[in-house]
Structures are given as C-alpha cells and as structure tokens.
Image: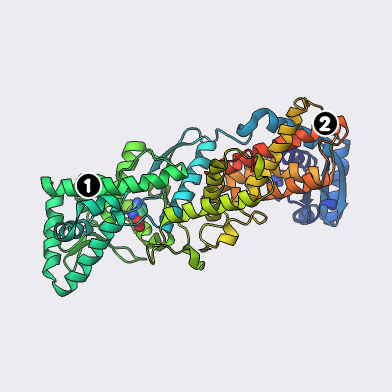
Amino acid sequence: MDYKGYIAECISKALNDDLDKVLGLLSVPPNENMGDVAFPCFSYAKQFRKAPAMIAQEVLERIKSDSDFDEKIIAKMEVAGGYLNFFLNRNEFISSVVSDVVEKGVDFARSDEGNNKKVIVEFSSPNIAKPFHIGHLFSTSLGNSIEKIYSYLGYDTVKINHLGDWGTQFGKLISAYKRWGVDEDILKDPINELLKIYVKFHQKAEENPSLEDEARMYFKKLEDGDEEIVRLWKFFVEVSMKEFSRVYNMLNISFDSYAGESFYQDKMPEVIEMLEEKGLLEDSEGARVVTFGDMPPCIIIKKDGTTIYATRDIAAAIYRKRHYDFHKNIYVVGLPQTLHFKQVFGVVDKMGFGWADDCVHVGFGTVRFPDKKLSTRHGDVVFLEDVLNESIAKTREIIENSSTTKEIENVDEVATKVGIGAILFTFLRNARERDIVFTWEDILDFEGESGPYVQYSYARGKSILRKAEEQNIEYRGAKLDVLDSQEEFALVKLIKDFPEAIRNAANKYEPSIVTRHIVDVAQAFNKFYNSCSILKAEEDVMKARLNIVEASCICIKTGLNLLGIEEVEKM
Ligand code: ARG
C-alpha cells in the first residue's frame, strides 16, 4: 500500500490540484505526536485568499466527507498551524507492511524499473605489478555495491575491471626484470618483488639516464608484439592477477570482464583517425591534444608518438557503447581523477557522441590509517590482504571472548563474514566523497554504527525465530493487526521506507544511503526487542511480533547483501 500516494490523492481531490504537486509538498512532521505525514498549506494562501490554517481545516473537512475516504488507512487528521497532519492507522499499517515483506522475502524491495537497461559498473581496476592498495579496495566495495543495487532495481549490469595493464611503465619493468629479476623470488611474492625491481630501476635511471631509452625500446617492442617481450608482460599479468584474485575471493567479488588498458591497444588508431577527421586534434609542443575552453587540454598522443591513459579511456568508452550499448557507464574511481574523466567525457562529447552524458564518474575520498598497528610488514604501503586478515582475526577474538560463542559451531566462517563485512561496511557507511579514517575501534565496534552491530542485530532476530520454531510456534499467517506501539510502528515505518532508500542510493550512486537505513532499522529493531516482550507475550501478540522480527531480519539481510556483505545466522 502506498500511503503517501493515498494521502496525496485525497488532498488533490479535495483541492482539485495536481497529484504530483501535492505529493511533492508532503513532509514528515517534526515529531511523531504530530502525526505521520504533514501537508503544508502555505503555498495556497494567495490563490485562495485565506489563511493557511483555514485552508487546512477545509481540506480536512472535504476529505472526511468524501464517500471514498478510508478510515482503515487514515486514523485521524489534525490541523496544526498551517499544516494538515495525518495519522496513519497503525494496526492496519503494521499489518499490511509486515505481511507483504514476510510474503515476498528478500525480494520485497526489488523492482523492475530498470527495465533490463544496460548499466556498466567499472570498479576496482588495480595496476599490474603494483600493490592493490586501500583506494582500490574503496573502489571495489563501492562498485560492487552499486552494481548490486542497480541489479536489484532491474537493470542489466556488467561489472568491468579496467586493469592497469599497459603503458610505458611496462618498458621500465621489463628492463628492470632483465637486469635484476629472479623468477624464484617473483613467484614467491610477485607484487613485492616486481615493485622492488621497479623502484630500483628508477633509482638507477637517475644515475644512468640511458636506462630510460632502454625502457622505451622495450615498450616499443611490447607494442610491436615482440614474442619474448609479450611473454614477459603476460607473466607479470598472470602473477599479479593471481594475487588480486585472492583478494576478490576473500570479498566474494567477481567480474564479467577484465578488459583493461591493454585491451584497447589495437582500438586506438581508429579513435585517433576519427579525432583527426573531425579536426579535433591540435599541436602542442609536439604533442597532439584536444583543447577545451574551461579546462586544461587532454593529451591524446605524446610527443614521442605514444598514446596515454586518457587515449585508452576514450577508446574504451567508444568500445563499450558499441559493444554493450549502455544506458549508463559508471566509473568508480577516486576523486583525484575527476579532471581526467571530465576530459575523457569532454573529448567523447566533442566527437559528437551524445551518450557522453551517460558516462558518470563516481568519485570517492581518501583513506587514512592513524592506527599504527595497521601498518604492516611491508612498510609504508598498507597491504589489503593484511587488513582483511587482521579484521578476521580480531573479530574471531571478540567472538571467542563473548559469552554467547559456545553455540557457534562455525567460528571461522562467522569471523570471516563479520570481519570482512566490517571492513566493507566502513567504506560504505559515509557519503563516499568524505575521507575515511580507519581505526579498529570504529570498524569493530559491536555497539556502534558498524557492520558487526548490524550483523548482530540480524543474528539476534534469527535466534528468536529459531526458538519459536523449536517451540513449534506457527506464527506465519497469523493475524497482524493487533500491534500499535510506538516502537513497533517506528520500526515498521523504516522497513516500509527501505525501497525508497535503495532508489535514492542508485540515483546518487551512494550505497551509504542503504547502509544508514539498515543501521536505523537495526537500532529500531533493538529498541523494539528491548521494550516489547516477544516469546513471553500473549499468543496473538507474540505471533504478530514474531512476524515483525522476521520482516526486520529480511530487511536487514537485504540491505547487507546489497552492500556485498553476507549475513550470519548466529554470532
Ligand atoms: N588503474 C587506475 C588506478 O589504479 C584506475 C583505473 C580507473 N579506470 C579508468 N577507466 N581509467 O589509478
């Protein structure tokens, strides 16, 4: 039942005014004693030449006298100042929302509004032979959740990992490998070893600049498809991917495509030709660039004739449009690359592709680690696997020291899901453009607005439902219109609003809207749990409350899963 819609209909009929306009005016009163939905009448004062309170009173009377008016939906109306306030019929409201959620399960908020339209979500995109750093994890968490949210809303999503697997740095790496590379060491600890020789290359090149020429020569060979050099490059890709895959497996994340920068190597000549044909390329100190009125030029070809990161991104966008015919092409990449994407989309737009407007850069802030304990054996860079493992270990410790652990048979599994979920949750808790300060107290605060707190609330609900089952209590299908307490009503209202939160999260590319909503649901659930007895209540109340518990669990599980977090049944 769409309550707001119903109220708007009543008002629009009474005022003979546009339904959407009325809907847009509806608000929520500042406190619950004043009702559930408010209609401000101020904007009608001029038109009707009456005081807003008088208009509110008239609307009230007209609605009441309408033969279609349904008291089962609206229990009461009240004029307060220039507002007409509506009080929902709580019994009815709780009953209809809860029965709907319990019946539909985790699909209760699903929709088909996406109409199978294609949405590309590009995320993670680490660089071959370089560490998968915490910024990549931020992108990975966000992108994974955004994809799940779009998919839940009926879009046909494609997850792309735009690997950084091409560029002049590979010439340097090959040169370094030929000088100092030891296969045995590389196979043992690929990324660290490759990083080590790459750093060494830079040091040595300072003393001996001819190394740079050597590197350029190798990159040229790579571009020309030299067999030995290509084989080496493939080796670097392979050993790096193996490491990245370990992280993806830990996070339970997969991709539909790993078409990274190298994939566009043979697609660039055509793009450059198109740019030339359209007269968009200009000379600038030997380089070929596209200029804009309002931002720095985008370099397409460097003065040594090679293409760059941006050129590959332009080729990628065009390829994606042709291959997927996307409705939206989303890039989940840190805020420092904002200008880069403005330029890339700007070039595409100048090429006359209207779909440039369907390309979206979803940026995010930086991550800081004030917690010294988090820095690792690897020195300055924080390695992701270490962070994940540490979170799992710490979670395990907390669970093992808690009094309820005895019941948990699968401590490892629970610690993994909760520990990893806690990290993902931390990335998805605040508006994405805000910087994040990572501290263990925060991440694993079982009582704060954390992953473990939400997980625990779910497990708490499930434990009640298990007890009910053990006692053979048949609560499904019970009569539900017996509940009307403030705690129950507040909780059910939040559950009812969840689909709208998901839609907002999609529109703003902001999973934190989902995160915050399930934190609210978890908090409301705990309030309800603490103030309403469930299994000790009278039979009909008990059964109805068990349905609220089940609806809450369904809502929390749906939310966690949309964040890419797996729920646990016991903890
Ligand atoms: N590999 C890049 C990095 O680590 C991110 C790639 C972002 N995606 C893109 N289409 N440019 O910074």
User: Which marked residue is nearer to the observer: mark 2 or mark 1?
Assistant: 1
| Residue that carries the numbered disc 2 in the rendered image | 68
Q: Position of residue 360 (x, y in %)?
A: 43, 51
Q: Is the C terminus in the top left, top right, bottom left or bottom right quadrant?
A: top right
Per the image, label 1 sits on a secondary structure element best described as helix
Query: Seen in the image, is 440 located left or right of residue 189?
Result: right
Q: Which mark is residue 235?
A: 1
Q: Where is residue 336 in the image (x, y as percent from the top left)?
A: 40, 63
Are there few (<14), some (14-19), or many (20+) residues within 10 Å of tag 2?
Answer: few
Q: Where is residue 48 in the image (x, y as percent from the top left)?
A: 80, 52
Query: Seen in the image, is 135 located left or right of residue 57?
Result: left
Q: Which residue is drawn at 58% across and 43% down?
A: 560
Q: Which residue is drawn at 36% across and 37% down?
A: 324
Q: Is the N terminus in the top left, top right, bottom left or bottom right quadrant?
A: top right
Q: Which amino acid does label 1 sit on?
A: Phe
Q: Residue at x 73, y 28 (%)?
A: 469
Per the image, label 2 sits on a secondary structure element best described as loop
Query: Would you place residue 472 above or below residue 289 in this image?
Result: above
Query: Seen in the image, is 380 located left or right of residue 537?
Result: left
Q: Residue 300 carries which label?
A: none
Say if residue 300 shows up in the picture: yes
**Would you identify the image quadrant in which residue 376 lies?**
bottom left
Q: Residue at x 86, y 30 (%)?
A: 539
Do the residues under discs 2 and 1 have CB atoms within 8 angstroms? no
Query: Seen in the image, is 555 located left or right of residue 539?
Result: left
Q: In which quarter of the image is ligand 1?
A: bottom left
Please tell me how many numbered marks the rendered image carries. 2
Q: Position of residue 534 (x, y in %)?
A: 81, 38
Q: Which amino acid does label 2 sit on?
A: Asp
**Would you identify the image quadrant in which residue 110 lies?**
top right
